[in-house]
Image (cartoon, rainbow, N blue to C red):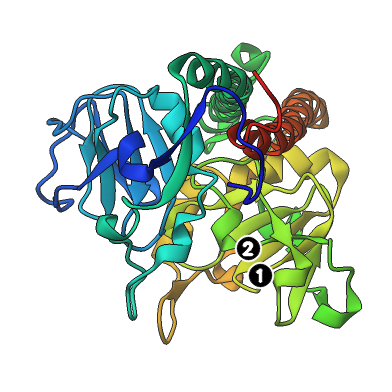
Amino acid sequence: MIEGHVMQSGWRPAHLEDLVFFQRGYDITKAEQKPGEFPVVSSSGISSYHSESKVNGPGVVIGRKGSLGTVHYIEGPYWPHDTTLWSKDLKGNHPRFVYYFLQTLGLERYDVGNSNPTLNRNHIHGLDIKIPEHRIQERIASILSAYDDLIENNRRRIQLLEQAARLLYREWFVRQHFSGHEHVKIKDGVPEGWEKKKLSDLCEEVHESVKPDAIEPDTPYIGLEHIPRRSISLSEWGLAEDVISNKNSFHEGDILFGKIRPYFHKVGIAFIDGITSSDAIVIRPNDSTLHSLVLMTVSSDAFVAVTAQTMREGSKMPRADWKQMQAYSVLIPSQGILNSFETLVHSIVDQLKAFTFMNKRLCAARDLLLPRLMNGVIPV
């Protein structure tokens, strides 16, 4: 909250516990969980799904340990993990308003842990805040939810587009049901006019090391923490000013493969130029007509599985080994099929990029509105 701001009509002084009363979550191990529909919400968000729930939604969950002060909104029944605090009592306030309001408090400042960040509910329940009337809460929640709904719709579109690209790759290159396959002879598992090559014939690992003082502070930085699991869209990034060690540069269109614990399946295409951690392999196709084939190959379940089987055991954690990766056998189709595949997947990638940047703009607009709405700077 902005100190010294004149209180708008309809707002009243209060304590955080007048807005929401938090309860510590419930411990449950991965081994104890059974497949189900109810989300298990940890400090970093939904971590898995279980056959049982502990709490009925809608509710708000905040990180108690690890990812301190993170805020998550859950619509239906859920299981709040022991690493969280959950909204046992919303005190009659609008659930989504509470969710948005908590994001403005900077709860990570109230860390009481020694080695592991920890949030104590007793230290935040007494925080001085201002609470608006319910009608104002509803209006604020409606404004901000409109942005989040658009963002979520775009995320679903991204998922569907990625699924379409994977299905196309699987049909053409795994099942070999490409256009006109009925009239093509197969010999030793290879369609006539196709050939087998090594991955190294299609692309290369790129090492373009840069020092922190040699790049602009606002240069995009993609580390392992920004690369999503099982998604080819690299839609999140930080800034070079937060990097203190030497990094590798990459260009738009390059493919980043998470080297550490490759079975985490962190592989994606860059929509920008930037720098990345040395824990990511930068893969660059040798030819533009090979780009989509390389992308879909190295992000496929089969390739990731083989990479995980041949990873090097490091001093602390296993790493992907490019020497092994580049020996992977790839089926190269006839030029006509290759061009058609490139055209179709390239169109999908263009849409993924468009939705990614659309969400960036929506997030920026929402985040600009959020504190102003919560401080009454913008009356509603």
Depth check, front residue: 340 or 374: 374
Seen at 12% across and 51% down, the residue is 31
Q: Secondary structure at mark 2?
A: loop
Q: For label 1, count other residues whose C-alpha is less than 10 Å away and answer few (under 14), some (14-19) or many (20+).
A: many
Residue 46 seen anywhere in this rendered image of the structure? no
Kind of residue at badge 2: Gly
Kind of residue at badge 1: Ser
Which x, y percent locates residue 30?
18, 51
Which x, y percent locates residue 364?
73, 38
Give the vertical position of 29 relative to 187 (above or below). Answer: below
Which x, y percent locates residue 225?
55, 59
Q: Is residue 86 left or right of residue 93?
A: left
Seen at 47% across and 64% down, the residue is 109
Q: CA distance from mark 2 to mark 1?
A: 5 Å
Q: How many numbered discs, if any? A: 2
Question: Where, by quadrant of the figure, is residue 331 drawn?
Answer: top right
Q: Residue furthest left?
A: 32
Depth check, front residue: 153 or 35: 153
Q: Which residue is mark 1?
A: 277
Seen at 32% across and 74% down, the residue is 113
Q: Is residue 153 left or right of residue 366?
A: left
Q: Which comes sooner in the sequence, label 2 or label 1?
A: 2
Question: Where, by quadrant of the figure, is residue 47 drawn?
Answer: top left
| Image disc number at residue 223 | 2
Question: Where, by quadrant of the figure, is residue 65 drawn?
Answer: bottom left
| Label 2 with label 1: CB-CB less than 8 Å | yes
Q: Secondary structure at mark 1?
A: loop
